[in-house]
Image: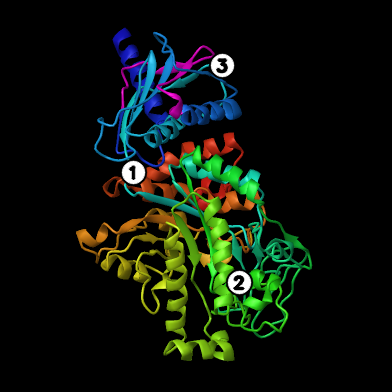
Amino acid sequence: MKRIVLAGLMSLISVCAIAQVNIIPKPVSLKVESQQKGFSINTQTRIVIENDSLRSAAVFFNDYLEQYLQFKLTITSVKPTENYISLSVNTSINKFDDAYELGVFSQNISLTGTSNRGVFYGVQTLIQLLPVTKAATLTIPAVIVTDYPRFAYRGMHLDVSRHFFDIDFIKKYIDYLAMRKMNYFHWHLTDDHGWRIEIKKYPKLTEIGAWRNGSIIGLWPGKGNENIKYQVLPNDVKITPANAVIKTDGIRHGGYYTQEEIKEVIRYAADRYVTIIPEIEMPAHSMAALAAYPEFGTEPNKPYKVAETWGMMNKYNNVFQPNDKTFSFLEDVLTEVMNLFPSPYIHIGGDEASKVWWKQSAETQKIMKEKGFKDEVALQSYFIHRIEKFVNSKGKTIIGWDEILDGGLAPNAVVMSWRGEKGGIAAAKVKQKVVMSPEEKLYLNHKQFMKEDSLAANKFLPLETVYNYEPVPAELNAEQAKYIWGAQGNLWSEYIASPAKVEYMLFPRMDALSEIQWSQKEQKNYADFLNRLKTQFKRYDLMGITYSKRYLNPAAN
């Protein structure tokens, strides 16, 4: 009888241990040592670092413990005989870049990476082994984990032009990326609706371009939006192409980051092994810049203003005049940007440049005739190539949306494929790096539910669709597939005006994205992911993250 009870108890202990091990993104290998006791963190536990280069990983773990579980451990280079968490680097443990091995034993925890980054990623796994409730002692199940990333580029984007977010939230956003083992933050700093980065040579970019006098209420007119009514403040508004009276709220909105603030964010991200890629939009999406400096537009004698409505590119002239004066301005701007950001990559946009404004401009047509361009597509290609040559001269590489393929791809550019996968496939076939970011699969500003309970872009992107996306198209052969550098989720902020709304749109879809980027293709399983997500919801609650409670009751959706 005692044996039966004991066996049952051991079984229960094993089940409880396994229940706690719900890691996202899923590791390459995870073995639960159900017969082992596991490790308990108490006030005497030490974090032992091999050298000071691992301090940022130790501090990140310690900060999480302190902020959410009210523990603060001592970080030291002296290893005690027991009750410690060891962080070290050993390049020979695995052939893969940024790999790590994590072993949780009764007397200690051993975390070894093939690089400092690998150790940091192992810390993110260790955090997910922690309890999701506060306790006097934190018990971690005994496990052996071997892990490494599938893709080298694991990115997430944030648009701060439509709505501005302060640096405290930008830091929190970077933490969210880091905890999901993402390594690139695409910072969309300029657009029609606001210029968000201080440029010392052109102060009016932030004095004028960083502020608008209102924002559109509801959705813009367009196909699919005719019969939709949303609850917005101050009133319910329905806009259709038939009544086409676009209303704005008249509320001044804006803000920008000083160069010192940007340096602070860059340092913060570097401690988390996140590279920040700044985006300076051109040749279109430039109304904020042109409001400040109209002489660089195709209609310099007409007043420009910072845009107050979203979309409708053909209605508003937002393109730069492609003359030498404009290129000198853009080179000055990019020089300050490149001097700020250590990233080897600069995103220059390149998307949605309506050619109508170049067609209507006598000066543009003269430039085209002088240079022998047959059409405005060729002109756009010239624009991108010229900017790329300048950026390359500074030792940097451009990234652009897939429109940079139009008229011929810039020779060294990285293509970010957003209009489906066609652009990415074309670039991969000519051996150029590609980041897959198709709108229909990875735009997290789209609605999570068919009956969305908050204002959002009028497209539907459920969690399952995100999770099941495969970044490597089947039509690429093995050699071409090597040029799929990775994948990125995008968050455009037209209808996202607060940090809480950012979180609501991100979670849990960003967890699904992380598994696309990090986990091995053959290991992905949506039902298993949903099961692991149950623990993640508890972690959201512990961290105070806003997310939809509808996910807790899937049958109701």
Marks 3/1: CA–CA distance: 34 Å
Is residue 188 shown to the viewer in this render?
A: no
Using the image, tell me which numbered label, if any, was put on residue 248. none
Label 3, secondary structure: give it: loop
From the image, tell me which residue sits under label 3: 136
Q: Earlier in the sequence, mark 3 or mark 2?
A: 3
Using the image, tell me which numbered label, if any, was put on residue 149. 1
Q: Is residue 479 above or below residue 32?
A: below
Tell me, yes or no, whether the two marked residues, 1 and 2, touch with CB atoms within 8 Å. Answer: no
Label 2, secondary structure: give it: loop
Inspect the image, locate mark 3, and give the three-letter code of the amino acid beneath it.
Ala
Residue 34 in magenta stretch: yes
Q: Position of residue 317 (x, y in %)?
A: 62, 80
Q: Earlier in the sequence, mark 1 or mark 2?
A: 1
Q: Is residue 22 left or right of residue 355?
A: left
From the image, tell me which residue sits under label 2: 286
Marks 3/2: CA–CA distance: 55 Å
Q: Please report the residue visible at 29 percent of the width from the left and 65 percent of the height from the top.
A: 428
- Dot 2, how many residues are within 10 Å of its Cα: few (below 14), some (14-19), or many (20+)? many
Inspect the image, locate mark 1, and give the three-letter code of the amino acid beneath it.
Pro
Q: Please report the residue visible at 42 percent of the width from the left and 72 percent of the height from the top.
A: 385
Q: Please report the residue visible at 32 percent of the width from the left and 33 percent of the height from the top.
A: 114
Label 1, secondary structure: give it: loop
Q: Earlier in the sequence, mark 3 or mark 1?
A: 3
Q: 352 and 407: which one is in front?
A: 407
Q: Position of residue 393 (x, y in %)?
A: 43, 62
What's drawn in magenta, residue-wise?
32-54
The N terminus: image quadrant: top left
